Image: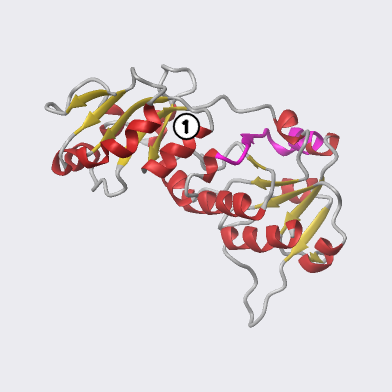
């Protein structure tokens, strides 16, 4: 490995871990697609397995043995090594998960290509909490849906918190961004998907009834934490589906709702 001991926090390459926020990393001009941060050796392993390329790695000395086999194919990638206190000063937090890697963002697939062989997909409309996005990806991976589509204003699945909460599954599950509903709905319909909006409505179908006779291809649409689905999403939907609730509770957290709905639709 190309090991570089940290003696100066202004060393070229360390800015990825100190002065650049998630938003700034995404806008890095070289490479064209920007960067994201993979946190922990497990997540780095999944990123590499997905074909993502590392730009650098940051870790403490005791994690070198874990990282070395992962970087066998990347001998020119710098591995910055420093003491715990130095790394905390650099990043602003305790690096208790072993390692960080600055990864090149992959090129996102065309939605039509992603949908071609899928049967169950999840559409995230304007979900702003990165924790919820990560948790939904973990449900998608664990319960067997095929892909995730995210709206233009949805939080970025490759933000560090999303990746961490998903346990790296955002690096396994195929996903891409879609345009606004006037373009997105025809893309889904042309691929043979019924659009099922998870929402409260007087004419909503209960989840159990819908799942018992679900179409071959379903796009399950989940809305933002505060306002739920937009009027445009509901207008684009072929069916509105609801999870029946008890004790005056009208709905679940969006990440919890995704797990319940996916379990019913994919079992």
Q: Is residue 136 left or right of residue 233?
A: left
How far across and down, in percent of the image, does residue 97 sit? Answer: 32, 48
267 relative to 70, above or below: below
Residue 143: x, y in percent? 65, 55
Image-based side of 233 in relation to 1, left or right: right
Query: In which quadrant of the rendered image does the N terminus lie?
Result: top left
Tell me if residue 177 comes above or below residue 234 in the rendering. above
Is 152 left or right of 193, judged from the image as shown? Answer: left
Q: Looking at this rendering, what residue extends furthest in the left direction?
A: 7
Query: Which segment is the magenta one?
Result: 172-187
Q: Quadrant of the C terminus?
A: bottom right
Q: Residue at x 73, y 39 (%)?
A: 181
Instruction: Decide if residue 117 is in sight here.
Output: yes
Residue 212 lies, in percent from the top left, at: 84, 64
Q: Residues within 10 Å of mark 1 (few under 14, many from 20)?
A: some
Q: Residue at x 88, y 60 (%)?
A: 213
Q: Position of residue 33 (x, y in %)?
A: 49, 22
Q: Residue at x 63, y 56 (%)?
A: 228
Snapshot colouring:
secondary structure
- Residue displayed at 75% across by 58% down: 265
Task: Say whether residue 238 is magenta.
Answer: no
Mark 1: which secondary structure? helix
Is residue 48 toward the left or the right of residue 197 in the image? left
Residue 184 occupies quadrant? top right
Q: Quadrant of residue 108?
A: top right
Q: Which residue is mark 1?
A: 48
């Amino acid at each position: 490995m190309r090991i570089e001991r940290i003696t100066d926090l202004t060393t070229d390459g360390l800015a990825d871990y100190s002065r650049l926020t998630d938003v700034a990393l995404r806008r890095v001009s070289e490479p064209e697609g920007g960067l994201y941060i993979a946190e922990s050796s497990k997540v780095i392993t999944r990123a590499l397995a997905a074909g993502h390329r590392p730009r650098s790695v940051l870790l403490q000395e005791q994690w070198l043995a874990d990282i070395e086999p992962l970087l066998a194919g990347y001998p020119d990638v710098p591995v910055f090594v420093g003491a715990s206190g130095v790394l905390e000063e650099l990043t602003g937090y305790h690096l208790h998960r072993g390692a960080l890697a600055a990864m090149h963002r992959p090129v996102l697939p065309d939605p039509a290509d992603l949908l071609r062989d899928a049967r169950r997909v999840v559409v995230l409309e304007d979900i702003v909490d990165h924790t919820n996005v990560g948790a939904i990806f973990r449900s998608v991976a664990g319960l067997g849906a095929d892909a995730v589509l995210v709206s233009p204003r949805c939080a970025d699945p490759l933000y560090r918190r999303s990746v961490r909460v998903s346990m790296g599954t955002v690096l396994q599950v195929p996903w891409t961004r879609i345009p606004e509903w006037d373009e997105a709905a025809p893309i889904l319909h042309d691929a043979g998907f019924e659009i099922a909006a998870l929402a409260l409505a007087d004419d909503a179908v209960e989840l159990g009834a819908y799942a018992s006779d679900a179409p071959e291809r379903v796009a399950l649409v989940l809305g933002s934490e505060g306002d739920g689905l937009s009027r445009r999403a509901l207008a684009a939907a072929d069916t509105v589906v609801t999870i029946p609730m008890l004790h005056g509770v009208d709905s679940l957290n969006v990440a919890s709702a995704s797990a319940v709905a996916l379990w019913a639709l994919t079992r």
